[in-house]
Image: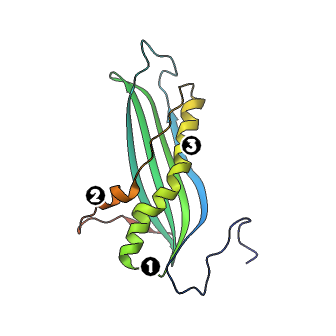
Amino acid sequence: MANEAAGTAPAPEGATGPILHLQHVYLKDCSYEAPNGPRGEGNWNPQINLDLHTGVTVLAPEIQEVVLTVTVSAKQGETTVFLVEVKQAGVFVLRNLSEEDTKRAIGAVCPGVLFPYARAQVSQLITLGGFPQLLLPPVNFDALYAANQNPTQSIPVEQAN
């Protein structure tokens, strides 16, 4: 118990019900590119593109790192104005969950927990780059997960070394 991070409660060991417990949230990686800086010609009306990706790495039995990658690009005509990529990660304890519940947790619940953190990082990077604030809209990860369900499709899982 002495090795636990301050401010985080351990997942109950003896619990027999399903457990989904967030242990840590952290910025794993980020990238910001603005080839021409914040100078723009004419009206500021860029085409914004948002891409989301979720990956998972098994760290230990019942402990998984989920990484939500958020990529935002802005183009004014054919010119790229900025490109931002944020990889927001979290370490989650998933215990006593069925296989279907585990998939749903990794594909919908965990990204839903991580998205507000990634959204704030994206907004901050864009603002620090000299552009007007960009607030990403809320994302319904449950709906995305349901839409992407296919018996032959799965989320890639990596084993930690």
From the image, which quarter does the N terminus lie in? bottom right
Residue that numbered label 1 is attached to: 97
> Compared to 44, does 9 lie above or below?
below
Furthest residue in direction top, as rendered: 42
Can you tell which mark lies on residue 147?
2
Task: Give me the residue at 40% from left, 80% from top.
Answer: 98
Q: Residue at x 40, y 22 (%)?
A: 45
Q: What element carries label 2?
A: helix
Residue 119 lies, in percent from the top left, at 52, 44
- Residues at badges 2 and 1 in contact (C-beta under 8 Å)? no
- Distance CA(mark 3)–CA(mark 2): 27 Å
Instruction: Find residue 156 and report its horizontal and vertical position in percent.
Output: 36, 64
First in sequence: mark 3 vs mark 2: 3
Q: Earlier in the sequence, mark 2 or mark 1?
A: 1
Tell me whether the residue at label 1 lies in contact with that at label 3, contact meaning CB atoms closer than 8 angstroms.
no
Residue in front for this viewpoint, 62 or 30: 62
Residue located at (49% from left, 27% from top):
34
Amino acid, disc 2: Ala
Asked whether the viewer can see residue 161, the reply is: no
Q: In this view, does 1 lie to the left or right of 16?
A: right
Q: Mark 3 points at which residue?
A: 121
Tag 3 or tag 1, which sits nearer the N-term? 1
